[in-house]
Amino acid sequence: MKRTTVLVADDHALVLEGLHRVLQPDFDVVGGVANGIALVKATKEFKPDIVIVDVSMPLLNGIEGARRIRAADHQTKIIFLSMHPEVDYVVEAMRAGGLAYVLKSSAGMEIVTAIHAVLQGETFISAAINNATVETQIKRERRSSEKAGRLSPQRRAVVQMVAEGHSTKEIANILHISPRTAEFHRYKAMESLGLHSLADLVHYGIVHHIVARRPMLAAPKTTT
């Protein structure tokens, strides 16, 4: 009998190793990646039954990665792994195509249960999160952010990388576009969102979960 294949995406090596140990007895772990761009590429290559995705990853966060996987019409089922118990993170993750949301603090106990749940066509949310509150908010919330909807996937990726402190040249290299095109995407993102500074753009990325809520190590670099 063919074992369920699982791809894991997390930017912490210890988390990848720990998940591999937990999953290996029951599932075929086909790989582990450390950022959202690698996640999308690996999902296309391996076509796993399940992807376990960290919400907060560099270059392309897990939620944006999930949107791209869904847009490509993959049959892969998505389980989010996160340190964030806040309901707005859960709602955004489920809207992006997630079928389960597991807190890292309880992943050792819940991740296998979550996988079995989604394979049976069910959803799963960590017991520590108020499921009823999540369901209510998903039903009534229509503000997945109208502003966020104005950004193309490419421009959301640029916003995240700007917020992470990458230079225009670095962004261009990562996305395989020219520096001029990277600058254009940054400018058009700010214009469409009505923002006037890079600080505003970074703040927007944090508020809308395009980049994790963690302090910047350095100011965003804009030079080529």
Image: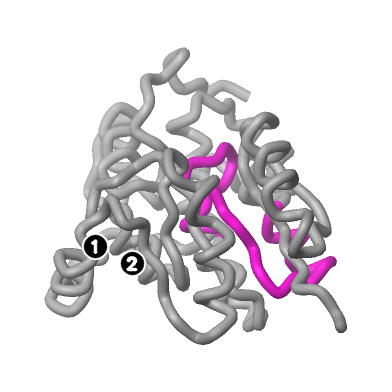
Q: Residue 130 appears in which quarter of the rendering?
A: bottom left
Amino acid carrying mark 1 in the image? Ser
Does 30 sit left or right of 177 as displayed? right
Q: CA distance from mark 1 to mark 2?
A: 6 Å
Cβ–Cβ below 8 Å for labels 1 and 2? yes
Tell me if residue 37 is in the magenta stretch: no
Q: Provide residue 48's location: percent of width, then percent of height.
A: 75, 70
Q: Residue at x 48, y 55 (%)?
A: 110
| The C terminus, quarter of image | top right
- Write down the region rendered in magenta: 39-65
Q: Which residue is disc 1 drawn over?
A: 145
Q: Residue at x 36, y 63 (%)?
A: 125
Name the disc covering residue 149, or none: 2
Q: Residue 151 appears in which quarter of the rendering?
A: bottom left
Compare residues 143 and 185 and report the one nearer the observer: 143
Amino acid carrying mark 2 in the image? Gly
Q: Residue 4 appears in which quarter of the rendering?
A: bottom right
Tell me if residue 52 is in the magenta stretch: yes
